[in-house]
């Protein structure tokens, strides 16, 4: 387990953004979406591998409360009847502390700063993916704080009110920090 495919996606977009003099602003939405999807896959992969006792590339494996034999065993517990889909994000968010003694996912469950960031990124990603009325309402409420609708690329290019960097950069830095925390020996959060 490692975060190399997340970092590779980030690097790919960094090269695109720095190598072209004129960038179509909608590419920021695509870049964010692709990176966030890779990040969600990273979280799912880590959760699954840690649940069956596998180690990260740094040799870290959290102590487990529940010891699953293999992925089939884990899936039988996680899957709802009559569905083949497992919403790993919800499982991680709501129950990872039941799976691990020193929960490596506590950074997204208990750290108020990262919990807020993850929720914003998830909401933004959902709106970019679906553009439904429901997703738009959540985006306007949770990300834009009811200050009027702007397109996601406009939000991503705006400076964060406290960080003096764009929201795009803020989110990407957060993804890197969170992914590094999860695969390294975490400290108590």
Image: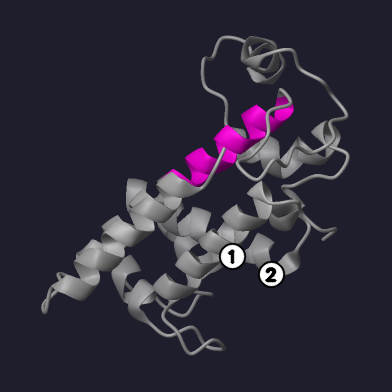
- Locate residue 168, reporting x and y percent: 40, 71
Label count reads 2
Q: Specify whether residue 104 is in view.
A: yes
Residue under the point 65% across and 45% down:
58
In the depicted structure, whether residue 22 falls above or below residue 73: below
- Locate residue 177, reporting x and y percent: 59, 63
Question: In this picture, which residue range is highlighted in magenta?
Answer: 38-51
- Locate residue 92, reporting x and y percent: 68, 39
Q: Which mark is residue 117?
A: 1
- Locate residue 143, reporting x and y percent: 50, 68
Q: Which mark is residue 113?
A: 2
Name the element at disc 2.
helix
**Residues tagged 2 and 1 counted as in contact (Cβ below 8 A):** yes
The stretch drawn in magenta includes residue 34: no
Majority secondary structure in the magenta region = helix
In the depicted structure, whether residue 47 falls above or below residue 109: above
Q: Which mark is residue 61?
A: none
Q: Viewed as shown, does residue 20 lie left or right of 46?
A: left
In the depicted structure, whether residue 78 falls above or below residue 49: above
Query: Is 157 or 65 nearer to us in this picture?
Result: 65
């Amino acid at each position: 387990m490692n975060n190399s495919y997340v970092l590779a996606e980030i690097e790919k977009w960094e090269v695109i953004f720095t190598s072209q003099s004129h960038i179509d602003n909608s590419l920021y939405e695509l870049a964010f979406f692709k990176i966030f999807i890779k990040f969600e896959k990273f979280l799912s992969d880590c959760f699954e591998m840690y649940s069956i006792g596998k180690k990260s590339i740094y040799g870290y494996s959290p102590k487990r409360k529940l010891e699953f034999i293999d992925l089939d065993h884990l899936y039988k517990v996680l899957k709802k009847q009559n569905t083949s889909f497992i919403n790993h994000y919800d499982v991680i968010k709501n129950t990872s502390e039941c799976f691990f003694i020193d929960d490596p996912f506590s950074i997204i469950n208990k750290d108020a700063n990262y919990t807020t960031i993850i929720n914003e990124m998830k909401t933004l990603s959902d709106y970019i993916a679906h553009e439904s009325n429901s997703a738009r309402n959540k985006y306007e409420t949770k990300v834009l704080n009811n200050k009027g609708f702007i397109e996601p690329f406009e939000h991503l290019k705006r400076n964060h009110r406290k960080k003096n960097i764009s929201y795009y950069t803020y989110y990407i830095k957060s993804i890197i920090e969170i992914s590094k925390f999860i695969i390294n020996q975490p400290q108590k959060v």
